[in-house]
Amino acid sequence: MSTALRSASAPARTPSPRRGAPERTPTPPLQVVAPRARRRRAGVAAAAGLLFAFGVMLGLVLFQTQLAKGQARLDQLEREVRAEQVRYDTLRGEVALLSAPGRIVEAARAQGMVTPTEVRYVSATPEAVAALVTATGEAPGLPAGAPDRPVPGTSEWSTVKPIVGGAP
Amino acid sequence: MWRAGRPHRRLVALAAGTLVLFGAMAARVGYLQTNQRDELASYGERQRTSSVTLPADRGVIFDRNGHELALSVPKRTIWADPRFWDGDQAGEPTVEQVALPLAATLGLDAAATGKLVERLTPRVNDDGEPREFAYVARQVDDTVAEAVAALEIPGVYDYIEPKRIFPNGDLAVGLLGDSVPDGDGSAGLEMQFNDLLKGTSGELVRERGSGGRTIPTGRKEVVPPTPGDDLVLTIDRTLQWFTEEALKRQVATTSARGGMVVIMDVRSGDVLAMANVRRDADTGVPEVSKANLAVIDTYEPGSVAKIITAAASLQEGKMVPGLRIEVPYGKQFYDYYFRDAHFHGMHDMYDVEDIIAHSSNVGTMLLSQMVGVDRMDHYLRAFGLGERSALEFPGESRGILKPGSEWQGTEKVTVSYGQGVAVTAVQLAAATNVIANDGVYVAPRLVRATIDEDGRQVEAPPSPTREVLRPDVALQMNSVLRAVICRGTGSRAAVPGYAVAGKTGTAYKAQDNGTYLDDDGNKHYYASFSGFLPADDPRLTVLVSIDEPSGDHYGGLVAAPLFVEVAQEALRQMQVPPSPGGQGCPPTPEGGE
């Protein structure tokens, strides 16, 4: 079969005669589909192609828009994270200022508190010590900052530091 | 003119023209891609990419209980682009029209306003480009920054910058030091541990579109900053504050020039408090010194050094407890006739405890002669004198201790009672601590741990130690030093409920003219008390030194009361229970300075 024939539209066929029909009408000769119909189909294909291309482009635009929206949201979230980090650091500084011994003593004195003139030690009974050890799991008499104990107050910071310390 | 009907020529001409045009374009592109490639590429890169330095958070300095002593908090820094008022366009303001409202909002005085005008005046940089950046005010509060923003001056902006704050005011300022606005430590621990604290800056590189928005599919590279490590000190914030306040009061009470207090944990060598107070030269008010005098200032320790001489005599077997020798009130040594500070008989028989309890210079010199110059030199150094401590603090002094072979004349005996040798307060505290720590020298330590960028706490190595005395000798010295409080010159250092051991010291202070007399012929003193408690189970070593007290100048009168005050607070803070046997003194103490 030649290339020209392969690319041509299929030839129109006349209805086949019914089985058992007594007479056969003469079959019209084969003919090439009219150029007008071919043009219409090409137009439809082109339109479909354009529509497809438009759809693809629209999809790309929509995808790009979604990306842009996502990036904008990301930027916004990063700004919010930075703002919260700043707030954390600011509040931390304020807590440190408020807990300074000098300020606390001043505030205590303003409320009428006085420094004790003497210190009286109360001895705990062995039973009380045992109860304390049972309840807290800590031996009495060890100061908070004793060398063999972790530094209190920094455990929370140890958790927070990797989060707030190095993030952009 | 082209004539109709010759389309071929026109087409050829059009093709030729197009070819020439494309050829020209290709040549231009080729030129740009070769000769100017790098320049244009970087220009394009600059246009669409933004690079922002991400500053690393400087590490926090904590006290031993996790309280912040120094930390960085975000502040706003206001800056300006002077090109906005360089006069190249009509209607631009003058520099004064910009600077004066800013100065008023910032509350600047006339001098500072003048400097601001100078800073904001447009000028060109060394490379000939107009200057684009000038600081208006650094690290200001939000309220100030917002007030400036409300002025709505074009070309004035702000950004967030960390500022180092010391939330406890001047607490331990000499120890902590300071840092410059750009973040590097400039003094004290801030400088010593700057590399550890400062961290590493990061960088954010991104492609940006109009309006500065990030291009979603563009390049975005983030090198996150590495925050600095945190320092956990051995200092106890509350005890440090209390000690400084008490020292200021004592300096004021005794009209002294200043003073120092060092409190150490006996076993670990941890410095729990290191207070430095100096009277302000202008106001005369005692203030916490910006210099860590306890490690950089040297002075002659006076009789506190007798601890070393007495210990050496016992360690060397030259003396034993209870062995008495004749200690006259006065005696000739080399070319000088020495007398004790307190009169006693010329044929009194003293043992080591008597010599130390009564702080006999003559008796101590006799002990040192028994020990000998070389061994005295050895023991002074073994107790940590003449060498920098393990603190490695910036500007730390090693003190003054000549080799024994260079001691001349009376110097061979005066070093035994602390004249002719100079020490730092921390050296003297560590030396006393040898007795408390069963004869083992433990180097003082200021840093207990670090916290890395991942929040992991890394304990600092224990302080180096070395055995100086046998434990039995340390125990004998413990008893000797308890006698100082029970019946000797340190009676005012007694702490109710606790057994105390220690030694008073009253030393002449060397003057700038190289003698012990000032230009008016007056002597000046360093009054000290160095001791430890509870003596029956030592936990804390405390040194108090008062610089140039007026009136009473004996260590037992000037320094001992402050020792009691700060020791009591230290015992409370460290939760040290009272001694089972109370003060542990015999029923009829003699007492006296």
Image (spheres, helix red, strand yellow):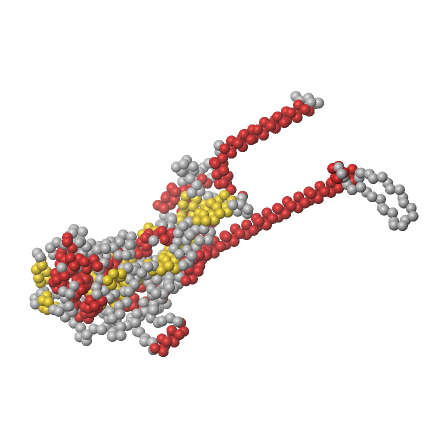
Image position of A53 with respect to B346: above or below: above
Image position of A120 with respect to B196: above or below: below
Image position of B491 with respect to A160: above or below: below
Tell me the quadrant of the picture where the C terminus of chain B can be found. Answer: bottom left
Task: Please say whether residue B78 is visible from this viewpoint.
Answer: yes
Q: Position of residue A168 (x, y in %)?
A: 47, 51
Task: Please say whether residue B341 is visible from this viewpoint.
Answer: no
Q: Position of residue B523 (x, y in %)?
A: 15, 57
Tell me the quadrant of the picture where the N terminus of chain B can be found. Answer: top right
Q: Which of B467 and B242 is in front in this view?
A: B467
Quarter of the image for residue B384 reads bottom left
Residue ID at (38%, 76%): A131
Q: Position of residue B401 (x, y in %)?
A: 19, 55
Q: Nearer the viewer, residue B128 or B386?
A: B386
Residue ID at (36%, 53%): B196
Horizontal side of residue A109 vs B157, given as left or right: left
Q: Where is residue B360 in the image (x, y as percent from the top left)?
A: 14, 64
Residue ID at (38%, 49%): B182
Horizontal side of residue B13 vs B226, given as left or right: right
Horizontal side of residue A16 vs B589, given as left or right: right
Q: Which residue lies furthest to the front in this view?
A: A1
Q: Which of B4 and B86 is in front in this view?
A: B4
Quarter of the image for residue B129 reads top left
Residue ID at (14%, 65%): B318
